[in-house]
Image (spheres, coloured by chain):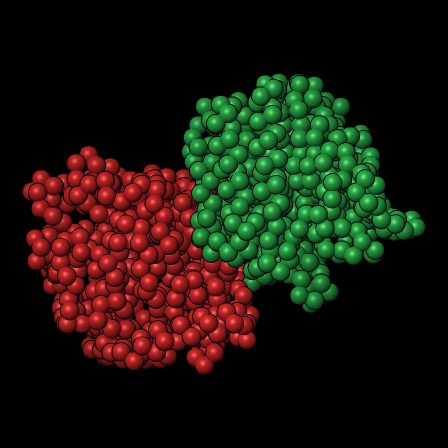
Chain colours: A green, B red
Amino acid sequence: MGWGDLGVFGEPSKETPNLDQMASEGMLFLDFYTANPLCSPSRAALLTGRLPVRNGFYTTNAHARNAYTPQDIVGGIPDSELLLPELLKKAGYTNKIIGKWHLGHRPQFHPMKHGFDEWFGSPNCHFGPFDNRALPNIPVYRDWEMIGRYYEDFKIDLKTGEANLTQIYLQEALDFISKQQASQQPFFLYWAIDATHAPVYASKRFLGTSQRGLYGDAVREIDDSIGKILKHLQKLGISENTFVFFTSDNGAALISAPKQGGSNGRFLCGKQTTFEGGMREPAIAWWPGHIPAGGVSHQLGNVMDLFTTSLSLAGLQPPSDRQIDGIDLLPAILQGKLIDRPIFYYRGNEMMAVRVGLYKAHYWTWSNSWEEYSKGIDFCPGQNVSGVTTHTQEEHTSLPLLFHLGRDPGEKYPLSFASDEYQRAMEQISVIVRQHKATMVPGEPQLNVCDKAVMNWSPPGCEKLGKCLKQPKSDPKKCIWPH
Amino acid sequence: MGWGDLGVFGEPSKETPNLDQMASEGMLFLDFYTANPLCSPSRAALLTGRLPVRNGFYTTNAHARNAYTPQDIVGGIPDSELLLPELLKKAGYTNKIIGKWHLGHRPQFHPMKHGFDEWFGSPNCHFGPFDNRALPNIPVYRDWEMIGRYYEDFKIDLKTGEANLTQIYLQEALDFISKQQASQQPFFLYWAIDATHAPVYASKRFLGTSQRGLYGDAVREIDDSIGKILKHLQKLGISENTFVFFTSDNGAALISAPKQGGSNGRFLCGKQTTFEGGMREPAIAWWPGHIPAGGVSHQLGNVMDLFTTSLSLAGLQPPSDRQIDGIDLLPAILQGKLIDRPIFYYRGNEMMAVRVGLYKAHYWTWSNSWEEYSKGIDFCPGQNVSGVTTHTQEEHTSLPLLFHLGRDPGEKYPLSFASDEYQRAMEQISVIVRQHKATMVPGEPQLNVCDKAVMNWSPPGCEKLGKCLKQPKSDPKKCIWPH
């Protein structure tokens, strides 16, 4: 989902009454970012509080490449990483993930080995249908075992876009919340729904109801579900004890537009890029009785902050034996403070850009390669900013391209290198970047090796269902990441 | 000002708390249009309820050209046109215009000859400073006479952007409202401020206060002033008897970006064009106790509707002896109804496009000429949609380019000519366009002839001020309209 997909962020159809109301009852973040322009690394960052380049969710196979966790990926979340649910357990929390895990699907990466007590969902994207020979269909797990596969047991109709998944995920969430409330146990629910990821889907009740087509139908169903979750918390009388945060793991995938792609508002480009459209996200914090209703924050925030903020809410400290990139947002949320901090925009192993205050400096620019572009792959459809949305990797490390995101949120007008403003801003930014690079210890890259043998051929539980598939011989290779 | 300039429409700095609150107390229009992508014709349409091609605010000097009322224009609003204030007088209204008139500056076009009882402001844009030899500085009028000139008596500092004009206009408005309330007389106030028109200005208190630079400062001052006007109405106890509507006369002028140009959100291009960025406008209706708070309307609206709606509010009928394009919006505003009607997008004498429901068909496309574009004049900076943002006038009358504005508000993905959807939509649209063209009686074009002799050399009142200038010999010529 992109920054511009909610009514409260200016989507012209304004079809998200529940999220808009969530914002009017809570706090809207206008300058909130994800940690990466792609899903898996962002989710790893959310749960570890650390940049993907630290927690291993990146590749060194080629320069500045977006890598993720498809079925043939060998890597996943290292045991050495401490995930939010692992830490929350110490404070007595019960942790559940509903939806897409995406931090590795081999046994050692299973979410319940990393602090979750319950899981309902899938390890990978809901791509398919596959033939179960060259590619197995993605399994859906309940806790330790698979209970079926997408397209076989959990239908997605690619023609009509119909699928009941968001409704299933919603019911899982409501049931979990009810159970926790009944047992008076604190909980962490990671509701990682994926209806707006291509192939986009919605259930029958929502199909055809949006001005925006199928993508809008999916957004409306998510919006409706979030409204139901918030009302459920209120009905159970625990809304004032429950901190809820809504955001997304990358900008809208404009490559899927107009049928399956969303909106990044007036920001440049989308998913896969380190322009604002790729990484600035819709974000709303909700906690009735604590967060002043109708609040608006310009705090530079990041999904990694949800790690530190959640620990803070639980009365826990973040780990002190490693670099944590997330900050505690509670002073911003509860007291309206503005905490000075940079935002780093990475693509794989490269820091492409950095934001400091209202300035954003691009050290590298790239949309995608000419080779891909000529095949019709375009991460910036209809947008073309000369020297900025480049189709070759352009290095600007000695003289970064600098934008003022207040006057120019669309990153169209680089400041003149000769201006005083450029000099002053870059002096400040250079120090921050130097320090960041000097102290950076990259983790072991997890997204370098691919092997068909590690696919979801025979997930645990497949025997009971008669759904075990024949695993091919192991043949590890360097993964190819074209973007 | 553009659609995307208000927080409530997704401006990322969200610096318009008063307009946002006006929307939350009133009704937000998401699909509201101006009558023309340029100022004078839109204002003529607002006050006559008629398309510029009917009321004469267009040119036939060249095909599909944007024309307006600079100082050397010979034409203006014809006496045969019935303006809103003329009609409101019949219902006992006192009418005042504050700010930019723009419907002609020669004596016969004076606003008080067309129904206004009071005027404070200027006949033309606040361009300048001029040398009073080749070009006279623009006069500022109080009622029948000039009281000074811009840059001489009404300062605008082009270096700092400082000018006190919005504050003066605000005080004029507050005083007028107080006077009317005291005399218990109904009033029509046309508050036609122009701080966001280049050269953009703001008063000292607002300079440097916006994240968005000078343009944002101007927006903040307008926002602040509107807050004060609404509060004034409430304080005087007449808010429930006063219908207030906020909108703009054209999209943000992207040509002036990033320093003096605003935002059209995610819409394509800006002022001067018939893409959504040029003509879709922010719009808010406010009338406490009558309009349900927090309402949102998808009614296709147009500034011309304010003519008919205002008459309706005053218990008057629109003239029946001529074609009126504006419709009465009260059923949409008060009862949430959706009235079926098309939106026509004109550029000069040409109907470039039409919107019917969520479909928009372009019969002609043009951004601006290659000749102008190569000089750096760009109405679509950073945007380039192949075959759409063309630099030659492209005719599509036999096979219009069709967009679905719900799925594709950015006009990037024309529907396939071969699709059923195209066929179905165009069948409906063609009927509407045929009927529109068959019954169109263009008015006498007012914006064809330019003459230096008609400039503001010696406006009424200049003698008292010693500000009469020498008028050159008359030399009427065809005006050149490059866009």
Q: Is residue A170 left or right of residue A141?
A: left
Q: Residue furthest right?
A: A473
Total count of labels: 0
Image quadrant holding the C terminus of chain A, namely bottom right
Q: Quadrant of residue A258?
A: bottom right
Which residue is at 37% across, 39% downward? Answer: B17
Q: Is residue A320 left or right of residue A383?
A: right
Q: Can residue B43 be seen here?
A: no
Q: Nearer the viewer, residue A310 or B46?
A: A310
Q: Can residue B417 be seen here?
A: yes
Which residue is at 60% across, 55% downward? Answer: A161
Q: Position of residue B335 (x, y in %)?
A: 28, 50
Q: Nearer the viewer, residue A11 or B193?
A: A11
Q: Quadrant of residue A83?
A: top right
Q: Judge whether B367 appears above or below A3 on screen.
A: below
Which residue is at 23% across, 64% downward? Answer: B49
Q: Position of residue B472 (x, y in %)?
A: 21, 73
Q: Position of residue B122 (x, y in %)?
A: 22, 57
Q: Judge whether B66 appears above or below B200 on screen.
A: below
Q: Is residue A26 left or right of residue B282?
A: right
Q: Nearer the viewer, residue B210 or B331?
A: B331
Q: Position of residue A49 (x, y in %)?
A: 68, 32
Q: Nearer the viewer, residue B290 or A81?
A: B290
Which residue is at 74% across, 44% downward? Answer: A148
